[in-house]
Image: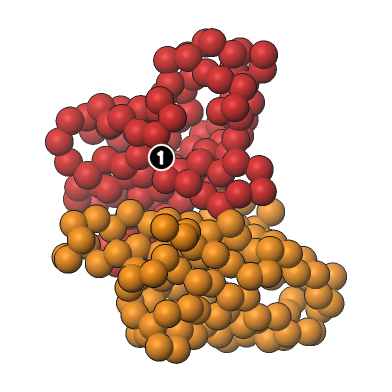
Amino acid sequence: EAGVTQFPSHSVIEKGQTVTLRCDPISGHDNLYWYRRVMGKEIKFLLHFVKESKQDESGMPNNRFLAERTGGTYSTLKVQPAELEDSGVYFCASSQDQRTSGTDTQYFGPGTRLTVL
Amino acid sequence: AQSVAQPEDQVNVAEGNPLTVKCTYSVSGNPYLFWYVQYPNRGLQFLLKYITGDNLVKGSYGFEAEFNKSQTSFHLKKPSALVSDSALYFCAVRDYDNDMRFGAGTRLTVKP
């Protein structure tokens, strides 16, 4: 079974530019999560999709961040315009619907390392 | 709000010795606790979780964790460390909305 994949693995952009990160969850996983780890700090939750709907976006830092999950499959996270403090590693995770599968363990992708210069 | 804390940034252990990576939690209600590991250039990998039941939870790669309600701890342990266990370890708690709240991470270094 293929795991969660993320693209790109690394991105280096200049302040003010736009970057779009992509996450492909494990097939059949309704739940999709975005997290961010800023250098040396804890991993912070950004938002949670259930299928195509945003279940919880309380962790999104500001309106420069836009996440979408059209069709309930892959998700994109766009940062526009990027600022220096947006640098970090962005992780995506997916999980099954616990009500139907009995498990809700989150499986993580390898992350996208974003560097804003 | 649910939260976890990892008091040690770094843990160094000699190969073959037992290892412990500490985690304490703060939750209201019953905690759902997790340990994840991140190897270099890899994503987070699930190790184990505590939901209910036996306080000693066994997970992948020979790791186990003990849930201690009185001490609000969920320390990760392994009886005999391997050099290949060197990685970044994250403790996490699941929030009401099924969102994960992570600790800052502990870097484990196992020396031969």
Q: Is residue B39 visible?
A: yes
Residue designated by label 1:
B47
Res B75 seen here: no
Check the image and report above or below for B78 versus A48.
Answer: above
Q: Position of residue B5 (x, y in %)?
A: 46, 41
Q: Quadrant of the C terminus of chain B?
A: top right
Which quadrant of the structure image shows residue B51? top left
Residue lying at 35% horizontally and 85% vertically, measured from the top left = A53
The N terminus of chain B - image quarter: bottom left
In this rendering, would A10 be left or right of B86? right
Residue type at mark 1 is Leu
Where A109 sits versus A11, above or below? Answer: above
Decide which of A25, B9 is in the foreground and name it.
Answer: A25
Chain of the residue under the numbered disc 1 shown in the image:
B
Numbered label tally: 1
Residue beneath the point at 81% across and 75% down: A13
Q: Residue A5's quadrant in the figure?
A: bottom right
Q: Position of residue B94 (x, y in %)?
A: 33, 55
Q: Residues within 10 Å of mark 1 (few under 14, many from 20)?
A: many
Residue at figure coordinates x 58%, y 75% from the top left:
A22
SS class, disc 1:
strand
In red, which chain?
B
Q: Colour of chain A?
A: orange
Q: Is residue A92 left or right of residue B77?
A: right
Q: How is the image coloured?
A: by chain
- Residue B107 x %, y %: 61, 34
Instruction: Kindly identify the residue that appears in the image at 44 percent across and 73 percent down.
Output: A47
In this picture, is B54 found above or below B32? above
Q: Which of B95 and A91 lies nearest the eye of the viewer?
A: A91
Q: Position of residue B85 (x, y in %)?
A: 56, 28
Say which quarter of the image contains residue A72: bottom left
